[in-house]
């Protein structure tokens, strides 16, 4: 008895292509390279921030020492002047002593309120300032220099506390760029303290420029100083000094990040932030810290190119070496994979033939027990299955097309049952009418109808069959036909429903039913006689009034119980009044959140279109329902019928 040959040794495709691990190696190398770059970059930024903080805070400390020293002497003199009166000579001696003992102070004055120093002298404001190595004395109390109007006088007077002024050019006094520390003082007069004047200490900004310029990090870095309002006090571009602010630069460049950084600086915060190219001429980083004494802020700019130059050079070398190595490995992979994947290329060519419709192409069997061999054999089996599937699909498609064609014909037939010429009775100006039906499927189970019973009476109805699709459409056609065949001038609406219900109950093995509202309008008088079989109550629309629900009599749905009884009621419509009939496809329409449209939205739309023609009212309701549902598919048939009574005399008002 012959024995079966041993199975071929299985060598998987993954084994043959194991060299592709190099791809994983490349991913790992790239991740490590990227992580190293990001980590090194962040470490450099942390080091730069720490160094910038030390450098900046050291400069802030030097500036603060000078500013705090400058604050002590005007505060001391203001305290003395609050407690005692000094004559002109004593005040000038005190001012001379302040400048002699404090070389950082450029000038100082004691500016009195009008007539506060002497009743016969309107102003008195002796000012001592440096002119080279000597001290000069002038009086600020003239018409050319009205000191009481300057901010250094007005602001501390109003705030009743010592303040540093914004930087300014003191034309007429010191004639230099300066900032003034102003201390108000007051004296006892009539049992209360009265503002008497201001003692100042002026600081020239030139020494601040020198201190700030020493902070320049790297060759292309620099430092700057802004005031409490963000105006540049110092900057390498002298055109910006006292002419631009950090906010005007941010606004011109449409840079919200720079604007937020400026806000943080004027709030007295410290931090480290990135700058866009427009500020420093290149991408850069900014460290900023406050000068608490004056409320200003100092910023140090670090160009990004200089910060990361070393790490970029290193990464460039590593990238070149890695690229060369992977190029060599890539060549090896191409040579090996070319040999292994040759059978796959053959199968690809065969697959292209099959894709073009040639299902008779021969698929050669690839020897071997690996995945390629198995794929070749599976491919041959797939080709045979595909031929069988295509044959079955063609038959199924033909059957589906026949079914869809029949549904379209059924829809056409169903819609032909419904009146769709509007206005339906142009010879009758006593009323206007419009209706529409939008099925949820190809065919639906809703219905509406209207026709004249005689020269003065209009019959109208609306209904909703249980279920959807072809069965509902057939039941709808039967119900509509029965109502039209039964309705007459001699029968009340309730009697019409009794007769139609009895006919629908006969041999109703499918247990289908329909809800119906019907009515007869006497368009001579506006009287509507109506009856209901389980349908939604219509809206009564009256000119100048809120829409209201029509009171309905009790009545069971049609087609369920043969002995059901119905009641007829009546309502009188005035010219301009109307009715809006609908099915629950309107109020139960759902949106994407599974919420219903509900009656309140229908009332709101009707309220906004009380005087609109019926066609416009129906159109607005449909638009509202579709806008509410959005992209949610329609779940039920939607039917609307609007009736407006005009009366014998035509009126432009329509419900």
Image (cartoon, helix red, strand yellow):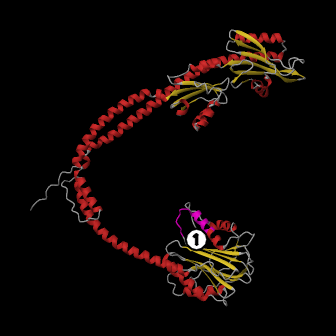
Q: In the image as oriented, which residue stretches furthest toward the left?
A: 1
**Quadrant of the drawing holding the N terminus:** bottom left
What is the x, y in percent for residue 480? 57, 83
Q: Nearer the viewer, residue 421 or 90?
A: 421
Residue at image location 74% in from the left, 11% down from the top:
136
103 horizontally vs 513: left or right: right
Answer yes or no: is residue 432 visible. yes
Q: Is residue 439 above or below residue 225?
A: below
223 horizontally vs 31: left or right: right
Q: Nearer the viewer, residue 581 or 123?
A: 123
Residue at image location 66% in from the left, 24% down from the top:
292
Q: In the image as oriented, which residue stretches furthest toward the bottom?
A: 490
Q: In the image as oriented, which residue stretches furthest toward the front?
A: 144
Q: How many marks?
A: 1
Residue at image location 43% in from the left, 74% down from the top:
404
Q: Nearer the viewer, residue 578 or 385?
A: 578
313 horizontally vs 166: left or right: left
Residue 380 found in image quarter: bottom left
Residue 454 found in image quarter: bottom right
643 horizontally vs 45: left or right: right
Magenta span: chief secondary structure: helix
The residue identified by callout 1 is 585
Q: What span is colored magenta in the figure?
A: 620-635
Counting other residues with Cα less than 10 Å from the Cα at mark 1, is it few (<14), some (14-19), or many (20 or more)? many
Q: Is residue 150 above or below residue 256?
A: above
What is the x, y in percent for residue 378? 25, 60
**Quadrant of the drawing holding the C terminus:** bottom right
What is the x, y in percent for residue 453? 65, 87
**Secondary structure state at the residue bearing disc 1:** helix
Residue 290 found in image quarter: top right
Answer yes or no: is residue 275 visible. no
* Magenta-span inclusion, residue 544: no
């Amino acid at each position: 008895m012959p024995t079966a040959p041993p199975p071929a040794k299985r060598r998987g495709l993954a084994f043959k292509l194991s060299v592709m691990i190099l791809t994983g190696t490349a991913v790992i190398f790239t991740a490590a390279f990227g992580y190293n770059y990001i980590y090194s970059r962040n470490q450099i930024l942390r080091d730069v921030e720490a160094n910038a903080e030390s450098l900046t805070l050291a400069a802030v400390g030097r500036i603060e020492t000078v500013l705090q020293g400058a604050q002590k002497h005007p505060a001391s003199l203001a305290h003395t002047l609050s407690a005692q009166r000094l004559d002109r000579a004593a005040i000038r001696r005190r001012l001379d002593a302040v400048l002699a003992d404090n070389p950082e102070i450029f000038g100082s004055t004691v500016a009195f309120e009008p007539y506060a120093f002497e009743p016969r002298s309107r102003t008195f404001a002796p000012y001592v300032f440096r002119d080279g190595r000597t001290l000069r004395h002038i009086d600020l109390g003239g018409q050319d220099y009205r000191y009481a109007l300057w901010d250094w006088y007005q602001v501390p007077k109003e705030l009743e506390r010592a303040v540093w002024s914004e930087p300014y050019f003191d034309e007429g006094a010191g004639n230099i760029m300066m900032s003034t520390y102003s201390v108000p003082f007051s004296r006892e007069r009539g049992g209360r303290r009265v503002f008497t004047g201001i003692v100042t200490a002026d600081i020239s900004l030139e020494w601040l420029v020198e201190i700030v310029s020493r902070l320049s990090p790297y060759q292309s870095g620099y430092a700057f100083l802004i005031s409490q309002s963000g105006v540049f006090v110092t900057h390498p571009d002298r055109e910006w000094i006292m002419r631009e602010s950090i906010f005007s630069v941010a606004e011109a460049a449409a840079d919200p990040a720079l604007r937020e950084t400026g806000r943080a600086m004027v709030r007295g915060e410290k931090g480290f932030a990135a700058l866009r190219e427009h500020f420093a001429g290149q991408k850069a980083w900014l460290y900023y810290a406050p000068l608490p004494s004056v409320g200003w802020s100092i910023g140090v700019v670090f160009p990004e190119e200089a910060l990361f130059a070393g790490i970029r050079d290193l990464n460039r070398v590593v990238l070149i070496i890695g690229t060369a190595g992977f190029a060599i490995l890539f060549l090896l992979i191409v040579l090996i994979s070319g040999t292994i994947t040759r059978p796959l290329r053959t199968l690809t060519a065969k697959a292209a033939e099959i894709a073009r419709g040639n299902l008779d192409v021969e698929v050669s069997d690839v020897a071997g027990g690996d995945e390629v061999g198995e794929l070749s054999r599976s491919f041959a089996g797939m080709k045979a299955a595909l031929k069988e599937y295509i044959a079955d699909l063609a038959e199924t498609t033909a059957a589906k097309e026949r079914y869809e064609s029949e549904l379209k014909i059924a829809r056409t037939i169903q819609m032909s049952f419904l009146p769709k010429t509007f206005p339906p009775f142009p010879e009758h100006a006593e009323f206007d009418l419009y209706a529409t039906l939008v099925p949820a499927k190809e065919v639906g189970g809703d219905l509406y109808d209207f026709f004249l019973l005689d020269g003065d009476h209009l019959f109208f109805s609306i209904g909703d069959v249980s279920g959807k699709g072809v069965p509902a459409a057939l039941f709808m056609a039967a119900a509509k036909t029965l109502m039209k065949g039964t309705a007459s001038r001699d029968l009340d609406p309730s009697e019409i429903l009794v007769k139609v219900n009895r006919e629908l109950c006969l041999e109703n093995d499918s247990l289908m039913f329909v809800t119906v509202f019907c009515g007869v309008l006497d368009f001579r008088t506006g009287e509507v006689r109506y009856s209901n079989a389980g349908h939604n109550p219509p809206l009564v629309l009256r000119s100048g009034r809120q829409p209201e629900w029509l009171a309905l009599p009790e009545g069971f749905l049609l087609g369920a119980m043969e002995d059901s009884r119905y009641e007829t009621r009546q309502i009188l419509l005035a010219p301009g009044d109307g009715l809006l009939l609908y099915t629950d496809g309107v109020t139960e329409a759902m949106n994407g959140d599974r919420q219903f449209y509900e009656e309140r939205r229908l009332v709101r739309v009707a309220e906004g279109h009380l005087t609109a023609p019926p066609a416009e009212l129906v159109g607005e309701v449909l638009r509202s329902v579709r806008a509410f549902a959005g992209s949610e598919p329609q779940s039920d048939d939607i039917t609307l019928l609007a009736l407006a009574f005009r009366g014998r005399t035509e009126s432009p008002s329509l419900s």
